[in-house]
Image (spheres, rainbow, N blue to C red):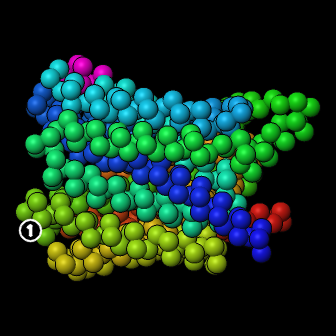
């Protein structure tokens, strides 16, 4: 009983610290997405060019996050393999974020600061998130990740409040507040967390010694990728495909919704842009329950049900084409999507062949998700060109079916496993 209580305390403690770090990071990213475009608009008249510059952070993430996650996996220090990178990266990112409004007077300087921030912030994003599987056992990762996702979702509200109450009168202070949150969170992490004590770090060090007779942690990224591609089981590759496909559907449903509301529902630009706001609350409400359901009934099963609910909501929105119908559809869709977003990273962590590669696999999740953010809006946009805006939600649902099929195949493969690994 004492051991169980101690494990729960440790799980709750590290979950809080990871959620705090992610909350601080995402606070800067959300304000970045909301307030950097107006700064660029002062110098650039082309919306396409502004969009291209704003999308560069996702492109950076596709390449930087897996590499940095892999680099941290191969790091061994008395502080562990994650904390040293966070102790350096988060303060640097905070200072660069503070510098953004001060650089707004010069376009070259502004772009330099933006790109520098995006490079640094992308470099430690998977490292902070990898602390969760480092410390928390496989059977409790879903509920912990749910708390982290809820913290991330709340940052949208924080960003909106800063934009409403501060940005017009105190533009420089608006960028300071999220930066201070980041500095506070890294200070707490550095003081309170030593991931050299985590079960995954201890297991990784033991694997190093068993394999080489001494600590020799280096696993080349090329070897990781070849193992992923050549694995006859294909489960890991299919999981990444499903992340790409569902990420495409999710980002398309978000980025094209304003035009959908204008073109199909006859709404104003402002009203159409607010269609998905209630769905943010639906996501937060559903996140923890779907984590508990996944731990009880199985993650793949709950993910499949969630994606089917998401696709069904897109059909509902197509059938009931009114503003109210769209709001209800997006709320149902967000609740279904939470099953995927909370649990699929956990599935990928649990499929990692070794504790030595948890950071790498966090980065691979990002490759699929950020890739979906890059591909999805363009793909669905091309489908809309053929079908018309009236069927945009149905097009999103069609893309979701690809993810459903990929996860269904993974579930089938896992039923054949004989090693007892829990996803």
Residue 54 magenta-highlighted: no
- Image coordinates for residue 229, horizontal then vertical, percent: 67, 43
Q: Is residue 379 visible?
A: no
Q: Position of residue 4 (x, y in %)?
A: 74, 70
Taking the image as shown, residue 279 lies to the left or right of residue 137, namely: left
Q: Quadrant of residue 175?
A: top left
Q: Is residue 172 above or below residue 379?
A: above
- Which residue shows up at 37% across the image and 51% down it? 376
Numbered disc 1: secondary structure = loop
Q: What residue is rendered at 11% in x and 60% in y? A: 270
In the rendered view of the protein, which quadrant contains the C terminus?
A: bottom right
267 is higher (above) or lower (below) than 35: below
Q: Position of residue 132 (x, y in %)?
A: 60, 53
Q: Is residue 306 left or right of residue 97?
A: right
Task: Check residue 108 for magenta coloring.
Answer: yes
Q: Main secondary structure of the magenta part?
A: helix
- Image quarter of residue 204: top right
What stretch of residues is rendered in magenta?
107-112
Q: Position of residue 251 (x, y in %)?
A: 35, 55
Badge 1 is on which residue?
Answer: 266
Count of marks, rendered view: 1
Q: Tell me, yes or no, if residue 390 can be seen here.
A: yes
Using the image as rendered, state which of residue 76 and residue 106 is in the foreground: 76
Q: Residue at x 41, y 56 (%)?
A: 152
Quadrant hosting residue 298: bottom right
Q: In the drawing, does residue 384 fall left or right of residue 46?
A: right
Taking depth in this image into account, of 149 and 181 the one nearest to the observer is 181
Q: Quadrant of the N terminus?
A: bottom right
For the point 53% across and 57% down, the residue is 16
User: How busy is the neighbourhood of tag 1: few (under 14 within 10 Å), some, or many (20 plus)?
Assistant: some
């Amino acid at each position: 009983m004492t051991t169980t209580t101690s494990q729960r305390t440790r799980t709750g403690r590290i979950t809080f610290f990871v959620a705090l770090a992610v909350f601080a990071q995402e606070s800067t990213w959300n304000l970045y997405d909301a307030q950097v475009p107006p700064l660029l608009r002062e110098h650039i008249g082309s919306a396409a060019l502004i969009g291209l510059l704003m999308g560069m952070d996702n492109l950076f993430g596709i390449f930087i996050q897996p590499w940095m996650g892999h680099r941290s996996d191969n790091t061994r220090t008395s502080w562990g393999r994650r904390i040293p990178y966070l102790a350096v990266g988060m303060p640097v990112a905070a200072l660069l974020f503070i510098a953004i409004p001060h650089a707004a007077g010069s376009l070259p300087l502004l772009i330099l600061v933006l790109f520098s921030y995006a490079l640094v912030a992308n470099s430690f994003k998977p490292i902070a998130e990898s602390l969760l599987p480092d410390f928390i056992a496989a059977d409790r990762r879903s509920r912990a990740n749910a708390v982290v996702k809820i913290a991330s979702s709340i940052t949208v509200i924080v960003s909106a409040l800063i934009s409403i109450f501060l940005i017009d009168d105190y533009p420089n202070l608006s960028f300071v507040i999220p930066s201070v949150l980041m500095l506070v969170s890294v200070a707490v992490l550095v003081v309170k967390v030593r991931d050299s004590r985590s079960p995954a770090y201890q297991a990784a060090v033991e694997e190093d010694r068993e394999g080489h007779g001494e600590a020799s942690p280096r696993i080349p990224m090329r070897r990781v990728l070849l193992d992923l591609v050549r694995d006859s089981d294909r489960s890991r590759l299919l999981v990444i495909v499903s992340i790409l496909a569902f990420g495409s559907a999710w980002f398309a449903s978000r980025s094209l919704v304003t035009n959908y509301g204008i073109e199909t529902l006859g709404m104003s630009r402002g009203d159409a842009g607010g269609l998905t706001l209630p769905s943010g609350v639906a996501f937060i409400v559903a996140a923890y329950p779907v984590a508990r359901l996944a731990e009880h009934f199985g993650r793949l099963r709950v993910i499949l049900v969630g994606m089917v609910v998401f696709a069904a909501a897109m059909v509902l929105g197509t059938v009931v084409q009114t503003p109210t119908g769209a709001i209800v559809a997006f709320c149902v869709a967000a609740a279904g999507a939470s099953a995927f977003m909370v649990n699929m990273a956990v599935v990928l962590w649990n499929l990692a062949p070794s504790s030595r590669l948890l950071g790498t696999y966090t980065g691979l999740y990002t490759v699929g998700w950020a890739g979906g953010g890059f591909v999805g809006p363009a793909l669905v946009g091309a489908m809309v060109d053929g079908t018309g805006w009236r069927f945009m939600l149905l097009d999103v649902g069609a893309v979701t079916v690809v993810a459903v099929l990929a996860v269904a195949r993974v579930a089938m493969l896992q039923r054949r496993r004989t090693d007892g690994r829990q996803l």
